Amino acid sequence: MACRIEVKQPAPGYALVVGPGGLAAVPGLLGDLGITGRLIVVTNTDLHGLYAAELKAVLPGADVLVVPEGEQHKSLDTVRRLYRQLVELHADRATILVAFGGGVVGDLAGFVAATYMRGIRFVQIPTSLLAMVDASIGGKVGVDLPEGKNLVGAFHQPVLVVADTALLGTLPDEEWRCGAAECIKHGLIADPLLLDFDAYHRDRAEALVCRSAQVKTSIIQRDPFEKGERVHLNLGHTFAHAIEQVSAYQWRHGDAVAVGLLAAARLSVALGACAPEVETQVSTLLAAMQMPRTIVDLEPAALWNAMATDKKWEQGEARFVLLRGIGVPFVLTGVPRQAVLDVLYSLRGDC
Ligand SMILES: NC(=O)c1ccc[n+]([C@@H]2O[C@H](COP(=O)([O-])OP(=O)(O)OC[C@H]3O[C@@H](n4cnc5c(N)ncnc54)[C@H](O)[C@@H]3O)[C@@H](O)[C@H]2O)c1
Ligand SMILES: [Zn+2]
């Protein structure tokens, strides 16, 4: 295996195992940890099409529940369907749910595991880069409502996370870039090596996943329930969520995060918190990775209004995660509207 990270908080913790061939190692890893019980896999139509035979070979006794592909199915309707399928299969409190998929499947299956019979154990086998470095770690699970993303959820920690980097071989390029945007975020928060273009060669996925997951696991262990430092993981996301919302979700999350990171760096420089080189470094890396750096078609005032409804802005006070430098994030409340608008206007031109 490429690496194994022991996540100790909240207790009892769990292992995050990264490397090619991780899927085949799942039964052995569970056995080593003394985790026994009937396994039921939750996956989506895409992944079932690609990996049904492997799943059957590795987990021969497991039932497999298949949900339709797509964020629109991260819903209470799908949750209800899964509950009923579990009842039909006579799943009980000793059953272990196995999420096999990207962040959508992980959040959905995790939410079902958090609530079915007041909570059953679950294992994450993330298959997208984003899920390996971000969504599968930290125990946040949940679903969307028509009114907004992730509005219903819980904290429910997995008993094991296995990131089989060989599975990334079938991940489409645009999905790779979405995960890479979160890795760049982790780089800005805590690990300059993740700001090196060479870290993003697809044949070096193990090292990338290990380094990036290390940043997330360090932070969530110090602050498992988002009382403080964990909010740093929202770097660029206030901008990103507004971009997604104003574009009616025509922008992919990772693309929005990429521009959001540039916006956060530029705002940090504009407010005198950080040296201009940081913004230049972000911009150069995004350009090299062919990630977006402009928001030509989006109206700054509409973006500001979308941000102002952010649930993390207490009493409507503008609150951003910014940078004092690479590896030094901080939260600033009361950021002037005009400073944010200036950044948004500057992102409409070519940079
Ligand atoms: N719980 C958390 O802490 C957390 C953190 C970040 C994001 N999320 C959630 O994660 C979701 C996004 O996750 P995502 O980017 O993985 O999206 P996703 O689950 O929709 O996966 C992206 C696409 O890639 C496909 N795919 C995944 N793995 C593949 C593989 N190995 N080969 C071929 N195709 C593959 C999927 O079928 C899907 O079409 C969002 O719902 C977001 O809210 C949760
Ligand atoms: Zn994100």
Image (cartoon, helix red, strand yellow):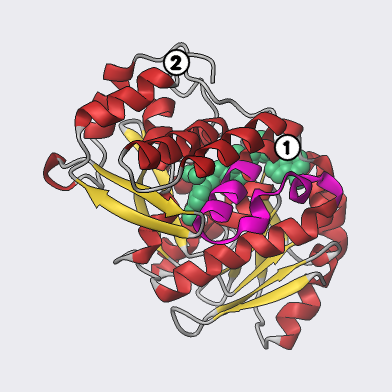
Amino acid on which the number 2 mark rests in the picture: Arg
Seen from the viewer's position, the closer of residues 12 and 231 is 231
Where residue 263 appears, as percent x and y from the top left, is 43, 33
- Disc assigned to residue 297: none
Where residue 299 appears, as percent x and y from the top left, is 35, 14
Amino acid on which the number 1 mark rests in the picture: Asp
Q: In whole angstroms, how far apart are the C-alphas of marks 1 and 2?
A: 36 Å
What residue is shown at x 48% (from left), y 39% (from top)? Answer: 261
Looking at mark 1, is its residue's CB closer than 8 Å to ligand 1?
Answer: yes
**Res. 86 in view:** yes
Which contiguous range is marked in magenta? 180-203
Ligand 1 placement by image quarter: top right
Seen from the viewer's position, the closer of residues 298 and 15 is 298
Residue under pointer 1: 46
Q: How many marks?
A: 2
Q: Is residue 122 above or below residue 131?
A: below
Q: Taken as a whole, is the magenta stretch helix, strand or loop?
A: helix
Taking the image as shown, residue 236 lies to the left or right of residue 145, namely right
Residue under pointer 2: 348
Which type of secondary structure does the marked residue at label 1 adopt?
A: helix
Quadrant hosting residue 46? top right
Q: Is residue 224 above or below residue 206?
A: below
What residue is shown at x 32% (from left), y 18% (from top)? Answer: 300
Please say whether residue 200 is one of the residues in the magenta stretch: yes
